[in-house]
Image (cartoon, rainbow, N blue to C red):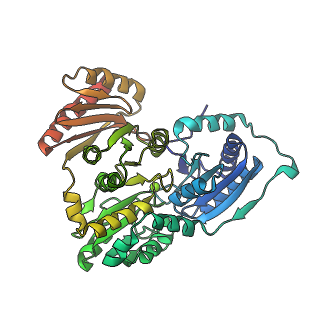
Amino acid sequence: MASYFGTYGIRGKLDLLTPEFISEMSAAFGTHLGGGTVLVGTDTRTSRKMVKNAAIAGLLSSGCEVIDLGVVPSPTLEFEVKRMGAAGGIIVTASHNPPDWNALKFVGRDGIGISKEKGETIEKLFAAKRHRPLAWNEIRDSARCNSAISEHLAEIKKHIKSSAISGRKPFLILDCGNGTAGLFAPRLFRELGCRVITLNAQPDGFFPGRNSEPTEANIADLIACVKALHADMGIAWDGDADRVIFVDERGGYIWGDKSFALCIRMKLREKKGLVVTTVATSDVTKETAEKGGGKMEYVKVGAPYISEKMLALNAVLGGEEVGGVVWPEISWGKDGLMTAAKIVEEMCASHKPLSSLISSLPSYFNAKSKAECGNKDKGRILEGIRKEFAKEKGAKAITIDGVRLNFKDGWVIARASGTENYFRVFAEAKSQKRADELLAKFKKKVEQIIARV
Ligand code: MG
């Protein structure tokens, strides 16, 4: 049976995402849900209407009722699934991928994205074409809802100490990257009393302003503007606004693990508990959680795994190193709008510039590389890595995703890329020298194993 689901939904170009494929897969999803109300929303891509309308046709054909939220951030749809108690949702978005990509992110009844493993049930229904044939009078209706962004925005504001922000009136530059953040973020921060300048705030599926992944190179204009205009902070989102990246008042690019650590510190001040992250996330998060009286729980890489574990263990916060934080008081999805509002709140309430908040976090150094594996069997390579790494004395192995070895003074992980022909190797330690040493040693081992397979 063909496998289509990645860690969160089905991503591809339009040669895969044909109207027939989309409607049949959406019908399989509707059958899996057993009917009920399904929310549908899109990002700003040019193919959004074709993909959305095919998805709606499939859902209606399987007996679902559809509410079309229009162009919305992914976290807005995830918030609405939880708020409305809907049967599920489909988000038409390829997140940070190039403009010619699109994707279907399926959201289950629990408000959590459908993972690769859970997607297998839907793939089976798709392969068997087992959609319940409906009689003409069993087909339900679809309706449009235009208030989702306002509702999500109002909910975020309930969880923000807005007087701390309006009292300071911080100067923010927002780079919405021509994605869905443009419909939401300028309004949110103006309503919170910030002084706001926007870059690339007009939604545009050609992404004329910049590529939609907020890497340091892609947000060079934002960094330059923060420095030139002496702003307090720059904020940049990816295409569907679940991920957010910050620039400090000096123009410094803040890695997502550090902003996640700030969120952990804030959250644990309010409420002690468990924090969930992936096994590949920097220890700046674990150390911050433990210092704050919390505990860190690891899952494999992929947003749905974080949310599933959070729900199961009643965690207070979750997140990953690329700048995605899950706030269970809002939804079970990564929410780049809530995260941005919380970081602005922290900067204002602490009366400290963002750079000094970041420098107050535990400091770690890392090194990363990748080992090409061509078309060789990744499972066999991983087996080899498991055996080889197990020989390492004085290290504790974690095998949730790839193999991670924890040493007293650092750690290293080797894991297969989900989509490309290589293994990622990442090392972290309290000094750059030790991180480089760990990386060099274990990358060599991985390369030797690949050569033997
Ligand atoms: Mg995204």
- Evaluate whether residue 97 shows in this view: no
> What percent of the width, then of the height, locates residue 79?
54, 57
Relative horizontal placement of residue 442, taking residue 107 as reference (left or right)? left
Relative horizontal placement of residue 53, taking residue 306 as reference (left or right)? right
Reply above or below: 446 against 175: above
> What percent of the width, then of the height, locates residue 325?
40, 53
Q: Residue at x 16, y 36 (%)?
A: 409
Relative horizontal placement of residue 121, taking residue 319 as reference (left or right)? right
Give the number of callouts: 0
Q: Residue at x 47, y 51 (%)?
A: 328
Identify which residue, 433 or 378, lies in the foreground: 433
> What percent of the width, then of the height, locates residue 82?
58, 53
Identify which residue, 356 or 122, lies in the foreground: 356
Q: Residue at x 29, y 65 (%)?
A: 247
The quarter holding residue 132 reads top right
Reply above or below: 286 against 95: above
Quarter holding the C terminus is top left
> What percent of the width, then of the height, locates residue 220?
30, 67
Identify which residue, 189 or 7, lies in the foreground: 189
Identify which residue, 213 or 118, lies in the foreground: 118
- Evaluate whether residue 25 shows in this view: yes
Quarter holding the N terminus is top right
